[in-house]
Amino acid sequence: MSNLNPLLDRNRAFVGNGHEVLSPLPNHQLFIVTCMDGRVDPAHFLGVGLGDALVIRNAGGRVTDEVVDEIVFIATVTETMLGDAAQPFEVAVVHHTGCGTGLLADDAFRTAYATRLGVDESVFRHKAVTEPEASVRADVELLRNSAVLPTSVSVSGHVYDLDTGLVATVVAPLTSTHDAPR
């Protein structure tokens, strides 16, 4: 039996409760970048409902080249679909306390992980989230300085505290600091 089977049963209940087709563009013009940790689900800690926001989850909720590509993709889709009627888009980067990527700060773990992947361990050193306020600031800065991020996109940074359940804004929304092509 597959571990997915109970969730497939939930899917059938979901369809039975009146599934509706939604727009590919989110209701809140929001793109959330957060961690893949099972304790960190924006549907729960932010009350994000189906169709409310775009969400990308990866280890640590870190901004990578792939994440930047996805943000530029959706900004381009939005501009193409809505033209001048497009509303400003916000990217909310959300890191959290107690992140498992903190293990990447440990030399032995990082070396073992890199060896398993067959890459140089130095590429993982900066991906550790040991101080979420600092790492979220770094990722927000990376996005704001990206030469490809459209100026219509604002970026904010937040930290979700697993102990209290509260999300604190560390960096308020602001648009990028460059003149990107539109």
Image (cartoon, helix red, strand yellow):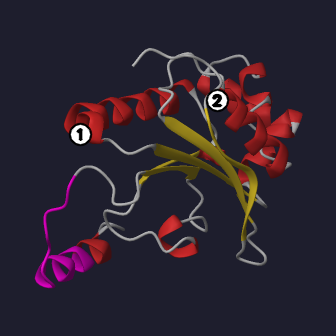
Q: Is residue 123 above or below residue 90?
A: above
Range of residues picked out in magenta: 9-23
Q: Which residue occupies 50% across, 33% down?
A: 67
Report the residue marked by disc 1: 82
Report the residue marked by disc 2: 144
Tag shown at residue 128? none
- Identify the image quadrant of residue 51: bottom left
Q: Is residue 85 magenta?
A: no
Which callout, 2 or 1, points at the residue further toward the start of the chain?
A: 1
Q: Is residue 47 above or below residue 101?
A: below
Label 1 Cα crowd, 10 Å radius (few <14 / some 14-19 / many 20+): few
Camera-side residue of 115 and 181: 181
Q: Is residue 71 above or below residue 150?
A: below
Tag 2 secondary structure: helix
Q: Which x, y percent locates residue 168?
A: 75, 64
Tag 1 secondary structure: helix
Q: Is residue 91 above or below residue 36?
A: above
